[in-house]
Amino acid sequence: MKQVLLTGDRPSGKLHLGHYVGSLLSRVEMQRQYESYIMVTDVQALTDNFEKPDIVQKNIYEVALDYLAVGIDPNIATIYIQSQIPEVTELTIYFMNLVSLSRLERNPTVKAELAQKGMTESIPVGFLCYPINQAADITIFSAEVIPVGEDQQPMIEQTNEIVRRFNRIYNVDLLKECRAHIGVNGRLPGIDGKSKASKSLGNAIFLSDDTATIKSKVREMFTDPNHLKVSDKGRVEGNVVFTYLDAFHKDKGEVSALKEHYQRGGLGDVPIKELLFQDLETLLAPIREKRANFSTEFVRSVLKEGTLRARAKAQETMRKIRAAMHLDHFV
């Protein structure tokens, strides 16, 4: 039996290079090795987009399109819409009894996202509780491998706390603990160098960006503000262009040589940005082409069929959970 892999993305916008190095590349490489469930997490997207359901609905299609374009195969992996699995909502409610408010407030991922979104006074309960919802997403499919970005590790730890507490309280060995699978390049900074690449901050290069947009964004990338002349010695640390070259340029020896040259002076920002642009265009051009060839009808059929498969699996797990909790009253 293959282990189950589960991951997903919020449909709050199209996916970008941060998603690609953080988890998408891993999903493509691992989809044949594991029984893969990949969800479009529209319920989680609504926790901070509840007044914009039309945007969330539109982006479900965009995210699914990105999945297919990067190489996720719907014949191998199950791509589904989170809100269409009501058993997850049921399990989320049960899990709420296993987590304290103070524990949710201490979750580093939640704290970071609250600060990023400026939620200091009025925090929606749904947003605060989304780690519980995520635990339900994972456990209802008995997932053991979760490809995520480095900043999401606290969510996995919280899921395992819930799993252990559930199994202990109900004296079962039913729910499985999981582990985070971090992408090789981990977290990718935004082009402004101030934070991680983010849809909401507008500092990301999207998988669907055209050639001109990629070139423009690479030109805007943060380098070394004190590197004013080509002859000046430059800093590599915090230089976004070199961070992206580390992630995307195949010749690592060449990147090392460029770093040394930049640090001793004599290398300007223009040639390294041009090299990065060529790397990104080589990577993204085939993804753009594939994206353009998928019809709306095909993407919808992929989502519908995947959701039906996912719900059948969720229903099977919930029957066992209800039995463990003595909630199978009429069976």
Image (cartoon, helix red, strand yellow):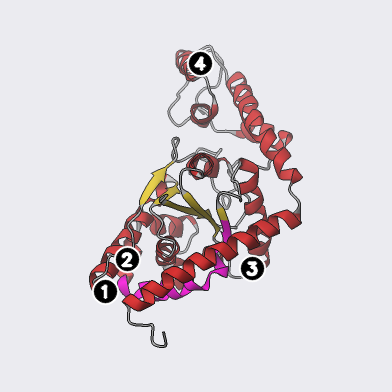
Amino acid type at mark 1 = Tyr
Q: Is 306 above or below relative to 53? A: above
Q: Is residue 89 magenta?
A: yes
Q: Residue at x 36, y 72 (%)?
A: 95
Which dot marks residue 72? Answer: none
> Tag 1 or tag 3, which sits nearer the N-term?
3
User: Which quarter shows the C terminus?
Assistant: bottom left
Residue labelled with disc 2: 174
Indicate whether residue 60 is drawn in magenta: no
Q: CA distance from mark 3 to mark 4?
A: 47 Å
Residue 157: image x %, image y %? 32, 56
Q: Position of residue 260 (x, y in %)?
A: 45, 15
In the rendered structure, the answer to whether residue 52 lies left or right of residue 242 reads: right
Q: Do residues under tags 4 and 2 come within 8 Å of each other at their CB atoms? A: no
Name the element at disc 1: loop
Q: Amino acid at mark 3?
A: Pro
Sequence order check: which comes first, mark 4 or mark 2?
Answer: 2
Mark 1 vs 4: CB contact within 8 A: no
Is residue 43 visible in the rendered structure shown here? no
Work out whether residue 44 or residue 200 is closer to the camera in this orientation and state it. Answer: 44
Q: Image height check: is 177 above or below 225?
A: below
What is the CA distance from the residue labelled 1 to the residue labelled 4? 57 Å
Looking at the picture, how far across and down is residue 32, in whole percent?
A: 51, 43
Count neighbours of disc 2 (C-alpha within 10 A) and say few if under 14, some if 14 to 19, many if 20 or more: some
For label 3, the residue is 53
Q: Amino acid at mark 2?
A: Leu
In magenta, the rendered stretch is 79-99
Give the secondary structure at mark 4: helix
Which residue is pictured at 23% across the width and 69% down the height? 168
Q: Which residue is disc 1 drawn over?
A: 170
